Amino acid sequence: MNKHENFSEWYNEVIEKAGLTDKRYPVKGMNVWPAYGWKLMRLIDDETRRLVEETNHQEVKFPLLIPEDEFKKEADHIKGFDDQVFWVSHAGRNELDIPLLLRPTSETAMYPVFDLWIRSHTDLPLKTYQIVNVFRYETKQTRAFMRMREIHFFEAHTCHQDEVEAEEQIHEDFEIMDALSKKLCLPYLKLKRTDWDKFPGAEYSVGADALMPTGRLLQIAGIHQYLTNFAKAYNITYEDIDGEHKHVHQTTYGMSERLIGAVVAIHGDDKGVVLPPEVAPIQIRIIPIIYGEDADLLNYCREIEDTLKEMGFRVDIDDHDDLRPGSKFFHSEEKGIPLRLDIGGNEMEDGTVTAVRRDTGKKTVIPYDKLSMNIKEILETMEEEMYDRARQDLEDNMEDAQDFAEMKEEKIYRIGWCGELDCGQYIEEVSDREILGTLYDDKEDHKGQCLSCGKPTVEAVYLCRTH
Ligand code: ZN
């Protein structure tokens, strides 16, 4: 398995060997979540829940099925999703009067109800989220975690009195995304999309893009400003403090299991996946270095296991007596368990353990009485270093380009574009890459010229291939 020689093959193999997904389900684009993979997803969801509830979002759950007439109220939205929808046309043998569709996203399920929930300015802001499965008929080649037809989806939907509040929400969303990305060791770019690439129905969209080892970007989250576009289509109004009726301003924030796909792709190596300590289903695996039987050593290992569990770590022990230590190391590495504790006769005598990091292989001998503190420290350092390495890689793979001839590699190019549609389409066609937008919050000083018409430009535009 060589990650850099054949990424696709490597990726497909490591996710299955780790037990993150089972691709044998007989519907294309719909995989099974085995226990280990689902636990990882749930730990990521838990962290997401913690972050959004800290900022006063409330969890809701809307039905999976949406009636056709509600779906068709916002014109741009339909245009964007129409050819991706799965339809339910029959109930038993009877054709339905109004066909139902499986939610591809939940605007059109939620907003007719938001209209009933919101009466006055005291009902605002309304900050909701749900974590559900959505369905999109994906026509491109499907890939586990990255491009699925049944998607594990986090979606936050908010309503506000005015544009100022809605803009503040977008900033808050990025604070949440930043915090989550640190825990997942996933540095990313915040790129404000072009008009032709924004979410269907949005005023503007900002993509969170992570760099894959292929040199292509993968969008791992989308944050969208709707202003009153949907509120007008669904007539969501409130009475303001002066008794005037106004449309609410709305935003959304979406993420999916692509977070797992990005973690695997960025941090995995030729031995398998490497999971970030904060969300790893098993953070520590104890490996008794035993050849044959040794009850004393096993008891010492179990004592350490109990101690670590009491301290709140997710820990297990590989006590298979039919496997040699080398095979146990191999299994632990394949599953991406962040820390291994090797415990043999020497460790037992000295009252220590030998900790081995999954990402760097670095070994540390830890005395029993310092277990908790030292392990916490090692895992925190590991998280920081994984993040920093990926951040460095992202920075090393960005380059300015003044003309098309310079774009020889698979990386992110910063170019000049005047913003005109024609020029944008020309640049995408000639470069065979996508314009992903401009940085959302850091204004860069980047004087250049449009690659198409030559007009002077002041902002860098990011051009790259995508997954
Ligand atoms: Zn131009």
Image: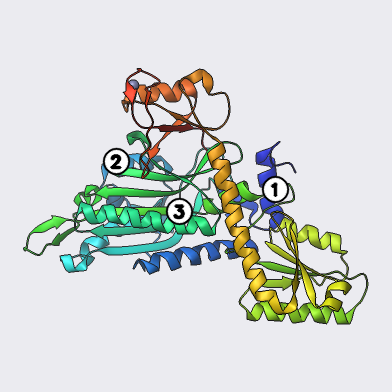
Label 1 neighbour load within 10 Å: few <14, some 14-19, many 20+ = many
Q: Which mark is residue 255?
A: 3
The residue carrying mark 1 is 269
Is residue 125 among what the camera can see?
yes
Q: Is residue 52 left or right of residue 248?
A: right
In this rendered view, identify the residue nearer to me: 361 or 243. Answer: 361
Image height check: is 276 above or below 221? below
Name the residue type under label 2.
Answer: Asp
Q: Position of residue 464 (x, y in %)?
A: 49, 32
Q: Position of residue 388 (x, y in %)?
A: 57, 50
Alpha-carbon distance for marks 2 and 3? 21 Å
Q: Quadrant of the N terminus?
A: top right
How many discs mark residues in the rendered view? 3
Q: Position of residue 199 (x, y in %)?
A: 35, 43
Identify which residue is drawn at 62% across, 67% down. Answer: 377
Image height check: is 370 above or below 332? below
Q: Kindly indicate the quadrant of the structure image that contains residue 121.
A: bottom left
Q: Which mark is residue 76?
A: 2
In this rendered view, identify the residue nearer to me: 44 or 24. Answer: 44
- What colour scheme does the image use? rainbow
Name the residue type under label 1.
Answer: Asp
